[in-house]
Image (tube, rainbow, N blue to C red):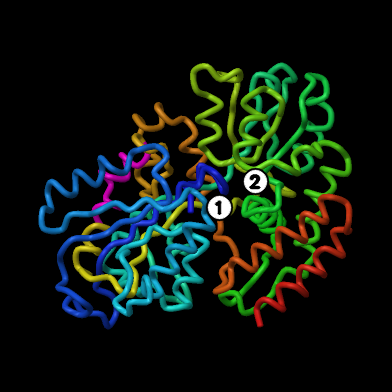
């Protein structure tokens, strides 16, 4: 599980596994210990090294509730597997796992909740009203709060502002404008037109969902029990991606791109437009980058105006075997406080969930993409919710890949997607 430095390599999904929590019907003295005490926090790899200092601050002021950090593999699949093994009871000793609080990828919340691996949480314990509101939806399942948003993310359209300035055009707000500029301007400068994350992995699921959402469609409804993808909007979204490859303004080489490959292509000066997470903007704008000072960012375009991103990030959830419930709640409150959320941004370069941070003039000067990211998050939506999200994602990847490779028409792809998702939902 990684941080969304991307949906692949950059998703440093920090799994905070902590002990105990007071939830609906769960008392502080239930389980194997009292409400307060030491905690275990697991992460899939703190690639920026910011988390240790944050936890040292907690440990200094909470000596009886110290947190132990456990770093799991960088691979999202490996991290998820280790977390599930632990939540099911560790090494079959019947005494529960090591992990208390988990900072899980937002797409895992429904699955973990549906299987009873994490506890429902009381809404009034956390300042949810202070968060960017779309992120709260990623932490709910079946109308109940099962986690607390910790870090968010949304896709942006990065572009070469120096080239568009030479051409006297504004960055695209619609698919038609993006296509036209990618077709006509990019070749004049020896560049590829547009790319995203199109290798068959979670990144392709995200890109496909964004295209469908931007066209006004959806993939699943009713917490994964109803398949809604067989629609004109979904066909329009899949056709947008397929047409790009067919007409050449999406290069075929982009079918092998994940976050890092696509970021590098843009940073090396080989792309006019790129869909990626904000970390790619930071990297491309950094000192020493070939395109430093030449990068702009706008919300993702859609058919008739700004489109929709899929929400990334991670949520803090409490395992069912958590030992010290009240301490878990207190640590969640600490990690989502405004002071710590500012450090999540300034030390970790990760997008916070607190709304006020995005309007701070000092932070906007340091991170100029914040207003655009805020706009994108406010228009964003979660990935399809399902207790079988891993299977849903695999189906989307396979079908959309065939459509983008020209092996299936968008119309046939959407019909197949509906059939295969219906089989998963049963």
* Res. 65 image quadrant: bottom left
- Which of these two is toward me, 296 or 13? 13
- In the image, residue 63 above or below residue 416: above
- Which of these two is toward me, 333 or 62? 62
Query: The C terminus appears in which quarter of the rendering?
Result: bottom right
Tag 2 residue: 306
- In the image, residue 67 above or below residue 163: below
Residues in magenta? 333-345
- Which of these two is toward me, 84 or 411? 84
Label 1 Cα neighbours within 10 Å, binned few <14 / some 14-19 / many ≥20: some
* Res. 347 image quadrant: top left
Q: Residue at horizontal 12%, vertical 49%?
A: 61
Q: Residue at horizontal 69%, vertical 60%?
A: 216
Residue 134 visible? The answer is no
Locate residue 183, reporting x and y percent: 83, 32
The magenta stretch spans residue 344: yes
Query: In whole angstroms, how far apart are the C-alphas of marks 1 and 2?
Result: 9 Å
Locate residue 49, reporting x and y percent: 35, 38
Which secondary structure, mark 1?
A: loop
Q: Main secondary structure of the magenta part?
A: helix
Q: Is residue 327 left or right of residue 117?
A: left
Q: Are marks 1 and 2 in contact (CB under 8 Å)?
A: yes
The disc label shown at residue 15, or none:
none
Locate residue 191, reporting x and y percent: 77, 25
Tag 1 residue: 379
The magenta stretch spans residue 380: no
Locate residue 242, reporting x and y percent: 82, 50
């Amino acid at each position: 599980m990684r941080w969304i430095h991307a949906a692949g390599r950059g998703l440093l999904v920090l799994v905070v596994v902590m002990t105990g929590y007071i939830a609906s019907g769960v008392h502080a003295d239930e389980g194997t210990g009292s409400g307060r005490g030491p905690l275990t926090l697991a992460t899939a790899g703190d690639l920026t090294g910011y988390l240790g200092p944050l936890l040292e601050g907690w440990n200094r002021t909470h000596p009886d509730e110290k947190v132990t950090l456990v770093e799991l593999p960088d691979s999202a699949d490996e991290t998820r597997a280790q977390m599930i093994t632990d939540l099911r009871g560790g090494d079959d000793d019947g005494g529960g796992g090591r992990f208390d609080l988990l900072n899980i990828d937002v797409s895992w919340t429904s699955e973990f909740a549906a299987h009873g691996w994490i506890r429902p949480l009381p809404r009034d314990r956390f300042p949810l009203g202070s968060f960017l509101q779309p992120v709260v939806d990623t932490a709910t399942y079946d109308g109940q709060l099962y986690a607390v948003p910790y870090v968010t993310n949304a896709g942006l359209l990065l572009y070469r502002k120096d080239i568009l300035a030479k051409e006297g055009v504004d960055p695209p707000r619609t698919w038609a404008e993006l296509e036209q500029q990618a077709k006509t301007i990019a070749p004049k400068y020896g560049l590829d037109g547009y790319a995203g994350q199109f290798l068959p992995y979670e990144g392709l699921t995200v890109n496909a969902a964004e295209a469908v959402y931007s066209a006004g469609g959806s993939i699943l409804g009713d917490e994964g029990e109803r398949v809604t993808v067989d629609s004109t909007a979904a066909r329009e979204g899949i056709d947008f991606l397929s047409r790009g490859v067919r007409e050449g303004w999406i290069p075929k080489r982009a079918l092998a791109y994940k976050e890092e490959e696509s970021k590098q292509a843009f940073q090396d000066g080989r792309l006019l437009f790129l869909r990626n997470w904000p970390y790619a903007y930071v990297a491309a704008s950094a000192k020493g980058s070939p395109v430093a000072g030449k990068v702009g960012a706008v919300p993702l375009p859609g058919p008739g105006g700004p489109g929709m991103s899929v929400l990334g990030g991670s949520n803090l959830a409490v395992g069912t075997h958590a030992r010290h419930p009240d301490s878990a709640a207190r640590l969640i409150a600490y990690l989502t406080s405004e002071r710590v959320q500012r450090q999540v941004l300034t030390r970790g370069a990760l997008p916070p969930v607190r709304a006020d941070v995005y309007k701070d003039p000092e932070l906007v000067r340091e991170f100029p993409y914040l207003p655009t990211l805020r706009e994108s998050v406010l228009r964003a939506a979660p990935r399809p919710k399902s207790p079988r999200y891993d299977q849903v994602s695999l189906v989307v990847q396979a079908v959309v890949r065939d459509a983008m490779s020209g092996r299936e028409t968008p119309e046939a792809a959407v019909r197949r997607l509906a059939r295969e998702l219906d089989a998963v939902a049963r």
